[in-house]
Amino acid sequence: MLIRKLLYIVFVFLLSLAGCMKDDELWEFEQEEHGLPNGGLFVINEGNFTYGNASLTYYDPETRQVIDDVFFQTNALPLGDVAHSMTIRDSLAYVVVNNSGRIYIFNASTFEVKGKITGLTSPRYMHFLSDTKAYVSDLYARSIAVVNPQTMEVIGAIPVNNSSSESYQHATEQMLQYDRFVYTNCWSYDNKVLVIDSELDQVVDSIEVRKQPNSMVLDRHHALWVLCDGGDEGSPYGNEAAGLLKIGAGSTEAQIIHRFSPGESPRDLKINGTGDTLFYINGDVYQFAVNGFNDPKLLIESPYEGNMWTGFYGLDVDPYSSEIYVADAIDFVQRGMIYRFTPEGVPLDTFRTGIAPGGFCFNF
């Protein structure tokens, strides 16, 4: 019994050290030798909150080669605390590390770090407007940061404050653009999609949707689709049935296309490469034709049963092949799993990742 207690104390101590390690600290390690793939996708592994164990896994669909922890293995730098999203522009990858308040920039082919953007509060997603201007949404800052990717500096901010109490200020998430206007969903304790004029860098309108819009896509007709989880039971913000909503191109009115049953909590709305079929996670993976009249169709069945913390955790669709990638965080402690499917839901491959795989970024 004493030995077990001592082992437990040592284990907790080591975990506390891991959580306190500095993101910029160079570690000594022996770099793994591997060939650089021609194209593929990054899996964004969130890691555990405050543990600083986020990572990136690289996968080549053609050869099925898997390269673990490519950022650290190339640069001898830990990625940081909670990797949330990633985008690639002109051969440079920008990975948003939420709880570290930074964006790391690295070469998408060699994985070599080029710099970082700091001075952010709780960044979520990055949206490019030009080579010298991008927006970064934020969970807590009550503003969207305007950054210059070339100088790697924050050059401005777009206030998103509202008249509600401090607890219910707009928290911005994904960003999609139609014409000069950028749309961003406010997920946490909110029911709005904000409309930003990218020439004025100013919020010019808002669209009311259902509670907690967690993801959005644009279809081939430039209609904006918004998936709302409805909030949690017992939440001080309240809850309602989840819904899939559609906002026509240039419109400020949202139309409910599909209502979910009470207790359902759908997430991770995605669209295929041709912009005509939606996919989302609701325990299992479902698909829905943007021009269809039928209910969503069960496409991929989850091996789990239970609440929102079990089952599939992340989803994306290859923009060229429309193949489907599903992330399984398992128990958020061990390494996660990725399942690859054809557009029809036929299994193609599986591979392991880092802890808590939650997102993808395609590199072609």
Image: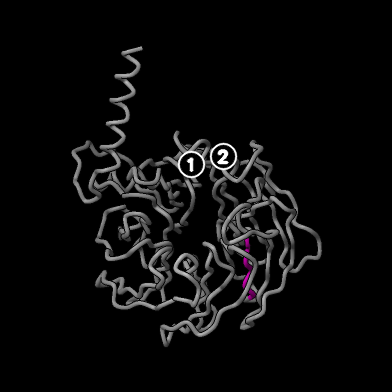
Q: Element under label 2?
A: strand
State yes or no: residue 335 in magenta. no
Residue placed most toward the observer, 260 or 114: 260
Q: Element under label 1?
A: loop
Q: Do the residues labelled 1 and 2 touch (CB within 8 Å)?
A: yes
Query: Taking 247 as reference, is 59 above or below it?
Result: above
**Which residue does the numbered mark 2 point to in the structure image?**
349
Figure quadrant of the N terminus? top left
The residue depicted at 70 percent of the width and 59 percent of the height is: 241
**Which residue does the numbered mark 1 point to in the structure image?**
64
The residue depicted at 28 percent of the width and 32 percent of the height is: 14
Query: Taking 213 as reference, is 224 above or below it?
Result: below
Q: Earlier in the sequence, mark 1 or mark 2?
A: 1
Magenta span of residues: 223-228
- Residue 193: quarter of image: bottom right
Residue 129 at x, y = what percent? 41, 77
